[in-house]
Image (cartoon, rainbow, N blue to C red):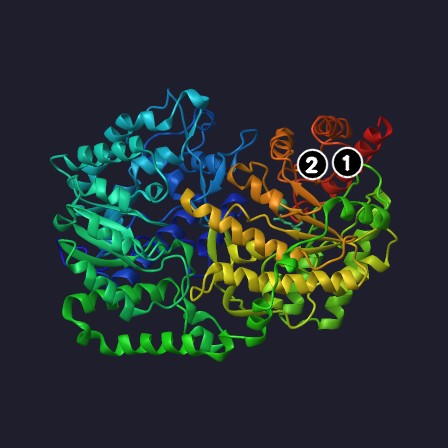
Amino acid sequence: MTGTIGSTVLGYPRIGPRRELKRALESCWAGRSSEVELRETARNLRIDTWRRLRDAGLDSVPGNTFSYYDQVLDTAVTFGAVPKRYAELGLGSLGTYFAMARGADAVPPLEMTKWFDTNYHYLVPEIGPGTTFSLADRTPVEQYREALEAGVTTRPVLVGPLTFLLLAKSTAGESFRPLDKLPELLGAYAELLRELHRAGVEWVQLDEPAFAADRTPDQLQALGDAYRQLGGLSARPKLLVAGYFGDFTEALRVLAGTPVEALGADLVTDPSTVDSLSGVPGLRDKTLVAGLVDGRNIWRTDLDRALTTAATLLGLAGEVAVSTSCSLLHVPYDVEVEDIDPQVKSWLAFAEQKVHEVVVLGRALRDGRDAVTDELSAAREAVADRAGATRVRNNRVRARLESLRPEHSQRGDYQERRAAQQKSLQLPPLPTTTIGSFPQTTDVRKARAAFQSGRIDRASYQQRMRDEIKRVIELQESIGLDVLVHGEPERNDMVQYFAEHLDGFISTANGWVQSYGSRCVRPPILYGDVHRPEPMTVEWATYAQKLTAKPVKGMLTGPVTILAWSFVRDDQPLADTAAQVAMAIRDEVQDLEAAGIRVIQVDEPALRELLPLRAAQRAAYLEWAVSAFRLATSGVSDSTQIHTHLCYSEFGDVIDAIVALDADVTSIEAARSRMEVLDDLNAVGFGRGVGPGVYDIHSPRVPDAAEVTDLLRAALRAVPADRLWVNPDCGLKTRGYAEVEPALENLVSAAEAVRRDL
Ligand code: GLN
Ligand code: ZN
């Protein structure tokens, strides 16, 4: 269909159905294969994707959704925003690109951060007063031609100019805002649009998700000005501007007054958007690309409901097209390849299935529901089966939650706890500890793989893990750490391990989703009421505790982090699901205590990750997130010490929530940000134990004792010695023993040196 968008998706996964791109990238980086081979793999993946999307029946196929690493980095390169330190390396185009992504020699990579509230990470562009924009790279044009040659007409997708600048970082501090460069950047976008037009492109999609978050009136004004300017170009493709991850209505009001032809809105993340659309004047002259199929979660769409929504939209917009709420980058490729429980499987839709849903919705809109009766009834059956399934509900879990009282989330007075803990643990001032994991050696990984594939039995797997735990305990004893850990060798991943031990979760074998670059994660699927059939960690922790007189810290993942790194059910409020997970963790905490474990750490590195994009929704989120943590950790006596670990130290909006967690000890990332975070904590009256990381585990560098001593002295200016803990930044899982051993030795001698001066 020319002219209209009809049915489409906003983007598609690119890592490859069998992670072909991951393998090709890593082999090229390791020098095992050539750039030519990498380019060939990439080209095949692109062509495969385009044809697949066309053959599935989409009216409009997105193009330029491929990336060797990240689409924000691609945008920076397209418009020539390559910082000098990379350009100067004199590497080829792909070499420079990878240097920005991963660093090269002595040049560190660009900073990386989370793409809105997803688990995808993008590279942060660096923009300064001296940045000059130009159309430096023509990949979007070339890929349009490449698709055309393969027989597919595509709609190139670009990160929009406002979102690009709003996500960028100023190289000149506060005195300069990247957005000030908008007029120059628009010149380069205009040039690209003209070239795309010359190449025959009919539609271009510009993504502006930054406007699903809170924006100032100035920024909204800039959005309008920008699209009036791009829309005013005399020779250009038609423009679709899309926003997602939240309510995009504010931006739609502005964009409806510009010449852009189509507007994309996410109608899933915040369903109230559907109602606010009636208040967008000018929508009648536009095509509304309705994001009716969830691009971020894996549940089959209720097609009847989506069609009802679409029907209400028909009266509001000039034309309605059907789409996903956002790019499908955030879901795995294909549920059909999974060998999982058939009933749960029938409730799921991965990227491939979602494309099909969009096509069906598009046909229903165009030709009427009768044209797709079979598809609609199949979807109806799956939705009804899921809603009525007994396995989704566990009445015991529900009854337990109903019977909870406020005292279940309240520990005793902190000063009393502290005295009881000191009596039980007898720790020196500035106690030393680690965050949980020790290096996962090839031996450990091999043992797990062998167990999974049945080459070794459970008993020999467990013996290997016990041997590893014994080694790690002996090492910590010899280094002289005060609170020991078992080292987490049995955990493939800090969330998946628990998902595999809890009822209500299912794990996939191939459900990979890109996290950043070649790194993929396989989020578990939380489909039903969560229940812990039996203890998950007690055996390992008590085995470790038997080997030493020092306290061994039990290690658990917190409820918020388990939700953040899973695909979560969408049939009840997140707060309710969090409470169920919290209850399971609470049971584990109590069992650890009963088994003689006196220190228990509940990690919440993702607490800040789920923070809603809109400030107005944050308090409600933090309320249930904090409640879940407290529910998980309040079932123990005063003498049991609760730790938590957060992977960051820029607390910002969550600082009060961190106080409210009421953990006895909080360890945080701080080695890179020095010790300023401690003043922030003091400012809000945080009077608990705190362990600012003094060893940056994100780098292979081994800090010497003098450096750690300095950090500890700096920390002591803000925190008294009886509340200061000494620990690395994060778990040691990704490091090698060659670095970890000397680093921990230095950490212990630094603590001893500082103690001597007290
Ligand atoms: N206990 C976990 C570990 O040490 C914590 C990891 C994390 O914070 N991401 O690996
Ligand atoms: Zn961490």
Q: Is 461 positioned to the left or the right of 305 in the image?
A: right
Q: Say if mark 1 contacts mark 2, CB within 8 Å.
A: yes
Up the image or down, 452 lies above or below 663; here it is below
- Residue 336: percent from the left, percent from the top? 41, 71
Alpha carbon separation for disc pair 1 and 2: 8 Å
Q: CB at mark 2 closer than 8 A to ligand 2? A: no
- Residue 206: percent from the left, percent from the top? 27, 43
The answer to whether any part of residue 33 appears in the image is no
Q: Amino acid at mark 2?
A: Tyr
Q: Quick one: quadrant of the C terminus?
A: top right
Q: Secondary structure at mark 2?
A: loop
Please name whichever residue, 420 or 489, is drawn nearer the observer in this view of the structure: 420
Query: Residue 91 appears in which quarter of the rendering?
Result: top left
Up the image or down, 159 lies above or below 24; here it is above
Q: Which residue is mark 1?
A: 747
Please name whichever residue, 340 or 519, is drawn nearer the observer in this view of the structure: 340
Q: Is 86 positioned to the left or the right of 324 in the image?
A: right
Q: Residues within 10 Å of mark 1 (few under 14, many from 20)?
A: many
Q: Residue at x 22, y 48 (%)?
A: 263
What's the mark number on residue 135? none
